[in-house]
């Protein structure tokens, strides 16, 4: 009988290369940290190359695993193609893609401009779609058993006032994830979604700084606390690694029980 791999081997990312969009800060950087700690070479990409380079240098210093920055606008079709090809040329492979680039705007629908709606959907959904498409083109052709992780949200499945652009875009991410997972199912390339709840990130500062809104939000969370950045790392490494090799098209919620109610 063939020897079964140990769990530590299943979760290892040694020898693999991961591209993380929105990787210079927040959830993206925390996910990249987890991937690096599991052994993956990481490429942190966002619109601000200087921030990416700084975060990559700190990540490499912390983990001892090579990390690199890349300037990337996920809404720019040509930019996406260029950066993916640069990663393949420099590293010879791409095993993991994390689509973490995202924006949020809070406004009642009557007061939300079409421009604002298009901006949020453009980054959160169209940007994810463009990166998934490029991953399909390059990762399938290279023959790797790769993993694409899209960032959904607890708000992919529940609504909340003043979030019509964000909820619309994140619900779309789930549909995108399921569809490409089926298209790729026989190729060795998997696609799943991570759906975080309320994390202590810059995007949530307006709520964090308002005690009344914080209390209202935590009242909906069964575990009654904000998630810390480290809470995303284990689930991300799981979906990136062979530990989840029989999962595709799934949405993994890290939301303190919010969507279980």
Image (cartoon, rainbow, N blue to C red):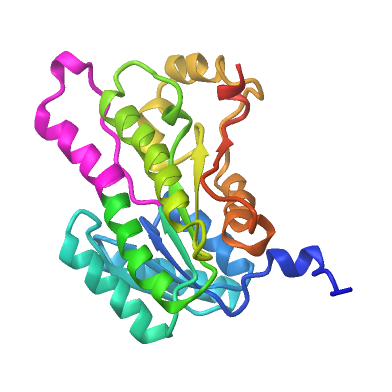
Seen at 10% across and 34% down, the residue is: 115
Question: Which of the pair 132/179 is nearer the observer?
Answer: 179
User: Which span of residues is magenta-colored?
Assistant: 100-126
Considering every residue shown, the one lying at the far right of the view is 1
Quick check: 154 above or below 70? Answer: above
Considering every residue shown, the one lying at the far front of the view is 186
Question: Which of the pair 205/31 is nearer the observer?
Answer: 31
Q: Is residue 97 left or right of residue 1?
A: left
Seen at 23% across and 21% down, the residue is: 107
Locate residue 95, reporting x and y percent: 49, 71
Q: In the rendered picture of this protein, how many numbered marks are placed on residues?
A: 0
Locate residue 66, reporting x and y percent: 50, 80
Quick check: 255 above or below 95? Answer: above
Locate residue 15, reporting x and y percent: 58, 80
Seen at 62% across and 63% down, the residue is: 241
Quick check: 207 above or below 82? Answer: above
Q: Does the segment drawn in magenta span residue 123?
A: yes
Q: Quadrant of the C terminus?
A: top right
Q: Is residue 218 left or right of residue 176?
A: right
Q: Is residue 211 left or right of residue 123?
A: right
Locate residue 250, reporting x and y percent: 55, 43
The quadrant holding residue 137 is bottom left
Q: Does the segment drawn in magenta span residue 249?
A: no
Seen at 37% across and 43% down, the residue is: 176
The quadrant holding residue 165 is top left
Question: Which of the pair 247/52 is nearer the observer?
Answer: 247
Q: Quadrant of the N terminus?
A: bottom right
């Amino acid at each position: 009988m063939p020897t079964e791999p140990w769990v530590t081997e299943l979760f290892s990312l040694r020898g693999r290369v991961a591209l993380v969009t929105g990787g210079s800060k927040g959830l993206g950087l925390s996910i990249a940290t987890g991937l690096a700690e599991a052994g993956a070479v990481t490429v942190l990409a966002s619109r601000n190359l200087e921030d990416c380079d700084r975060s990559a240098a700190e990540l490499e210093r912390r983990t001892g695993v090579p990390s690199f920055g890349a300037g990337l606008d996920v809404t720019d079709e040509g930019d996406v193609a260029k950066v993916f090809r640069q990663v393949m040329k420099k590293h010879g492979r791409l095993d993991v893609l994390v689509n973490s680039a995202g924006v949020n705007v809070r406004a009642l629908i009557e007061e939300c401009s079409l421009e604002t709606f298009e901006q949020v959907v453009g980054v959160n959904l169209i940007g994810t779609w463009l990166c998934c498409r490029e991953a399909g083109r390059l990762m399938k052709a290279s023959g790797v058993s790769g993993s694409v992780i899209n960032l959904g949200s607890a708000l992919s499945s529940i609504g909340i006032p003043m979030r019509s652009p964000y909820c619309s875009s994140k619900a779309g991410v789930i549909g995108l994830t399921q569809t490409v997972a089926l298209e790729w199912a026989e190729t060795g390339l998997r696609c799943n979604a991570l759906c975080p709840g309320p994390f202590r990130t810059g995007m949530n500062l307006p709520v964090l700084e308002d005690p009344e809104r914080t209390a209202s939000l935590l009242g909906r969370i069964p575990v009654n606390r904000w998630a810390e950045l480290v809470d995303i790392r284990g689930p991300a490494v799981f979906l990136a690694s062979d530990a989840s090799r029989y999962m595709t098209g799934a949405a993994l919620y890290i939301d303190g029980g919010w969507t279980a109610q």
